[in-house]
Image (tube, rainbow, N blue to C red):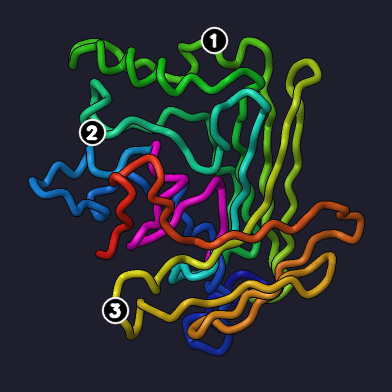
């Protein structure tokens, strides 16, 4: 089916070719929408260090991911090079108070192809062999003033030992049938790389509200050794299936805030 026909059917609500697309932000943390600070210190309220342990109220994020138009069911991957202190699950950048030119993402990534109906999308993320220089980027940019150049990822030595080109491809056979292919190219000598694909249901149930946009908690269940099923009140059921040669283990966890390490052990009830 041609793109024009897919779009026409979508606009006429005959089919929903636009339901799924690259609508998942790569960097949702640190936005002013997540500001519940007492004195309006929006840039400092939600630091990157909390992103892996804290539930977002207004959205989700993930590395070069995929989601439906309302962000209910999200797919993305986590990467680990065996050296970073944390998994690479989202783009890192400086908030408005850290960068000498205000907010700024410090990553190398490329959006390469996208059809109008998102029947095909392709993007690439560059993940270094060396440990990602989180502290160096913050400290050096904070040291510089407004008249100095920004200190970017390519100014560090992080790519000196090589990197991985992680290419993401999404192709729709039908409006709700999507092939996900991840191609990995090692640009350098042999190095360690772990890749963890995953899906999650955005947390809409922890805020004490009900109704549209605050759907009750859904469920993700293992069905076979190669498939899990996601159930959501508004979105319905969808299956996430791995290839037949997958011998990995399915890991399940709750999408809830982990209070350890911040808020003095008190969970948010906002």
Residue 98 percent across, percent down from the top left: 26, 26
Secondary structure beneath dot 1 equals loop
Q: Nearer the viewer, residue 21 or 220?
A: 220
Q: Which label's residue is closer to the chain start, 2 or 3?
A: 2
Type of secondary structure dominating the magenta stretch: loop
Q: Is residue 116 visible?
A: no
Residue at 90 percent of width and 61 percent of height: 244
Q: Quadrant of the C terminus?
A: bottom left
Q: Which label's residue is closer to the chain start, 2 or 1?
A: 2
**Mark toward the viewer: 3 or 1:** 3
Residue 135 percent across, percent down from the top left: 41, 19
* Residues at marks 2 and 3 touching, judged by CB atoms closer than 8 Å: no
Secondary structure beneath dot 3 equals loop
Q: Marks 3 and 1, Cα distance to the nearest angstrom?
A: 48 Å
Residue at 71 percent of width and 42 percent of height: 195
- Horizontal relation, residue 264 to residue 78: left or right: left
Q: Which residue is mark 1?
A: 157
Q: Which residue is mark 3?
A: 209
Numbered mark located on residue 26 in the image: none
Q: Nearer the viewer, residue 138 or 183?
A: 138
- Is 11 contained in the magenta span? no
Q: Quadrant of residue 6?
A: bottom right
Residue at 41 percent of width and 15 percent of height: 136
Numbered mark located on residue 96 in the image: 2
- In the image, which residues are magenta? 49-67
């Amino acid at each position: 089916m041609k793109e024009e026909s897919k779009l026409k059917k979508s606009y006429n609500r005959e089919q929903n070719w636009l339901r799924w697309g690259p609508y998942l932000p790569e960097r949702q943390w640190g936005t002013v929408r997540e500001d519940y600070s007492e004195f309006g210190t929006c840039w400092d309220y939600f630091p990157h260090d909390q992103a892996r342990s804290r539930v977002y109220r207004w959205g989700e994020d993930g590395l070069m991911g995929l989601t439906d138009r309302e962000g209910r069911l999200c797919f993305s991957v986590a990467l680990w090079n065996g050296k970073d202190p944390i998994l690479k699950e989202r783009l890192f950048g400086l908030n408005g108070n850290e960068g000498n030119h205000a907010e700024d993402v410090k990553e190398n990534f490329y959006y390469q192809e996208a059809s109008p109906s998102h029947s095909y999308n392709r993007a690439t993320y560059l993940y270094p062999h060396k440990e990602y220089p989180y502290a160096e980027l913050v400290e050096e940019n904070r040291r510089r003033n407004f008249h100095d150049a920004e200190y970017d990822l390519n100014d560090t030595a992080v790519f000196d030992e090589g990197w991985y080109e992680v290419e993401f491809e999404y192709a729709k056979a039908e409006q709700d049938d999507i092939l996900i292919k991840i191609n990995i190219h090692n640009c350098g000598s042999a190095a360690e790389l772990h890749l963890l694909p995953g899906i999650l249901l955005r947390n809409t149930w922890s805020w004490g509200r009900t109704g549209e946009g605050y759907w009750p908690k859904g469920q993700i269940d293992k069905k076979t050794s190669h498939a899990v099923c996601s159930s959501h009140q508004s979105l319905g059921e969808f299956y996430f299936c791995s290839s037949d040669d997958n011998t990995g283990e399915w890991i399940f966890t709750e999408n809830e805030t982990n209070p350890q390490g911040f808020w003095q052990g008190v969970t948010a009830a906002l």
